[in-house]
Image (cartoon, helix red, strand yellow):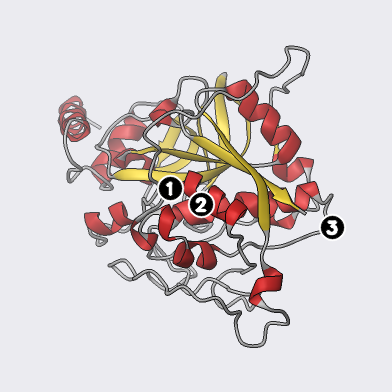
Amino acid sequence: MSKLTLILLLTTCIAGSLQTPTGCQTTDALIDYINSLDTTWKAGKNFDDSYPKQYLKGLLGGRRRSTPYAKQPAVSDELEIPESFDARQQWPDCLSIKEIRDQGSCGSCWAFAVVEAISDRICIASKGKQQVEVSAENLLACCSSCGVGCEGGYPESAWSYYKNTGLVSGGLYQSKKGCQPYSINACEHHVTGKLPPCDKELRQTPKCAHTCETGYNGTYTKDLHFGTKVYGFSNQNREVQADIMQNGPVVATFDTYDDFLTYKTGVYHHVGGGIPGGHAVKIIGWGVENGVDYWLVANSWNEDWGDKGLFKIKRGNDECSFESDISAGLPKL
């Protein structure tokens, strides 16, 4: 790449970080710019250029709380926090931890992140005896206090809904698993893959129903799962790590920039582009890569996005406000 080309890319992408998303958003120009920096992560084509910017923005449905969480009790200095931790390895019998779900053409990341963490925590608390996929459909459609469904929602409110109202079981689209499987199909948000292409406009929020899918062996009321406690963390990384080690994955809601959409491998940190919206994801661990501390995170855009559906993000400096809004809850078994 010539020096002139690099200067032009730099100018374009930096301009994009000072205003609304620009043409540099998911184009080859942004990808080339990021990779030319030789930074801690690599970019690539995750979304086809034919997808409108409004569609991509619509996938980012995580809404952050306006005030910090109350401080959780500090973890004892005697507790040893390992350099790396992966919930998939710590609890290998809990199959839900390994699963990468797909929110489809809906800004339901907030619902997916929470029900994924709930599913994991039920399994962990029951020592593997309860393997349940909690329904994203049920939360998305029925929690009116959580936000506006496919147009976004608040994870903290979703945890409270789980505690107070309860959530039924439900797997992925057409899985026939649980009381209310997800009704929006998985799709190829990205380049050509094994799934059908996504619609280029967002779906409507499903209608709330207090019944189970035809053929399910159980009733809605008896299928409900409840939580016992809801809490959160604002820039308390050691406490977050201790909670993951004891109870399982947690949910982070963060500012999402254009460059994040192009993530492929490495430890992400923001280098260019504007902020299309907020996103909610599930933290499953942490580690160190080439001297850089990171969080290990599961996304909900299927396994074709990023690093087989996962990403790493810089840990310790509240990158993209990632450490400011972390939520969790405990299951009632």
Instruction: Report which residue position mark 1 lands on.
Output: 154
Work out whether 154 lies above or below 108. above
* Residue at figure coordinates x 39%, y 61% from the top left: 149
Q: Residues at badges 2 and 1 in contact (C-beta under 8 Å)?
A: yes
Q: Residues within 10 Å of mark 1 (few under 14, many from 20)?
A: many
What's the amino acid at mark 2? Ala
Mark identifier at residue 158: 2
Q: Quadrant of the C terminus?
A: bottom right
Q: The residue tagged with tag 2: helix, strand or loop?
A: helix
Q: Quadrant of the N terminus?
A: top left
Instruction: Report which residue position mark 3 lands on.
Output: 129
Comes first in the chain, label 3 or label 2: 3
Q: Residue 53 location, x and y as percent? A: 23, 54
Q: Residues at badges 1 and 3 in contact (C-beta under 8 Å)?
A: no
What's the amino acid at mark 1? Tyr
* Residue at figure coordinates x 84%, y 58% from the top left: 129
Q: Residues within 10 Å of mark 3 (few under 14, many from 20)?
A: few
Q: The residue tagged with tag 3: helix, strand or loop?
A: loop
Work out whether 48 lies above or below 274. below
Q: State the residue lying farthest toward the bottom.
A: 215
